Image: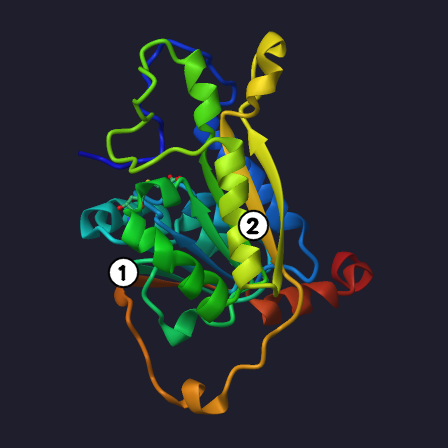
Amino acid sequence: MSKKAQDDVGDSGPRFSPPLYLQRYEYVQNYLFKTNPPIIKVADFGCAEGRFIRYLKKLPFAEEISAIDLEKQALDECVYKAEPIAWDFMFGRHRPMKLSLFEGSVIESDDRFKDLDAITCIELIEHLHQDVLDLFPKNVFGFMQPRFVIITTPNKEYNVLFPQLKETDFRHWDHKFEWTRKEFQAWCESVITEYPLYSYTLDGVGEPPIDRSALGHCSQIAIFTRQTIEKTSNIASLLINHKYKLFKFYNYPQRSAPAEEKLEFVNWDEVLA
Ligand code: SAH
């Protein structure tokens, strides 16, 4: 059964416009758009069938985009969102870009993922068993250490607005837990206590009805920002450690610079005379 991000809560309960999963993608994309210096290398962990890839491709300065999932079947579904389309060949990008799909777990340490600008984990952590979740911070914040880590996860407090959910139910059959805002915050605090290079802010998407604003957003979001770069040992970086299995990779064409330059210097007065 698919693990895709759309919550399994069916038709009853609050409806969102745009749909909640699109609000999450737009929020994360907007955040990445605004960063300065811009995002050049970014990885989306738990990419499922790759719907967020289309949003990442819009980042104008991106040169390396990776989407990673544990399940090969999910990566199969990513292919048609990841491959360049006619538009990409016609217009090209400012800079050449590589888009790769990888099979692997977010807790595996792979040297190629060490100097990323951002890691996104959209509705991933609640799919992790406790033993995997325990190892998540060590790899993401301790080993990969990107400039930004953006994590979204359901806000359990909001579930009372879904009449079909009993108190112990989760929004999706594959969720291992769902957290209240306090629980998520406590986890974020534990992360920065262990990895003081990072600070975080909390936010959310999916507004509650006006009379239930105390419940908070339907999806909660944490944005972790690295304050400094920790010096990693050169010895470690000499070891080739490629844990993720490359599933597919695409080279996106660069806009043809010579042709553009020629156009820029055309003397139109002469041409039109
Ligand atoms: N981010 C997607 C959907 C996430 S659903 C979106 O917003 O559209 C969770 C996904 O995480 C599933 O595809 C599941 O296969 C994947 N996953 C579960 N455990 C994982 C792990 N340890 N490492 C990487 N991906 C994992």
Categorize mark 1 by other alpha carbons within 10 Å: few (<14), some (14-19), many (20+).
Answer: many
Front label number (2 vs 1)? 2
The residue that appears at 47% across and 72% down in the rendered structure is 114
Q: Which mark is residue 126?
A: none
Q: Mark 2 to mark 1: distance in Å?
A: 27 Å
Badge 2 or badge 1: first in the primary sequence? 1
Image location of residue 53, percent across then percent down: 42, 47
At label 1, the amino acid type is Gly
Is the C-beta of the residue carrying label 1 under 8 Å from the nearest atom of ligand 1?
yes
At label 2, the amino acid type is Glu
Q: Relative to 97, is 189 on the left or the right?
A: right
Against 200, residue 239 (above or below) is below
Against 11, residue 172 (above or below) is below
Image location of residue 57, percent across then percent down: 49, 51
Could you tell me which secondary element the residue under label 1 belongs to?
A: loop
Near-viewer residue (48 or 125): 125
The residue that appears at 60% across and 69% down in the rendered structure is 257
Q: Which mark is residue 104?
A: 1
In the rendered view of the protein, which quadrant contains the N terminus? Answer: top left
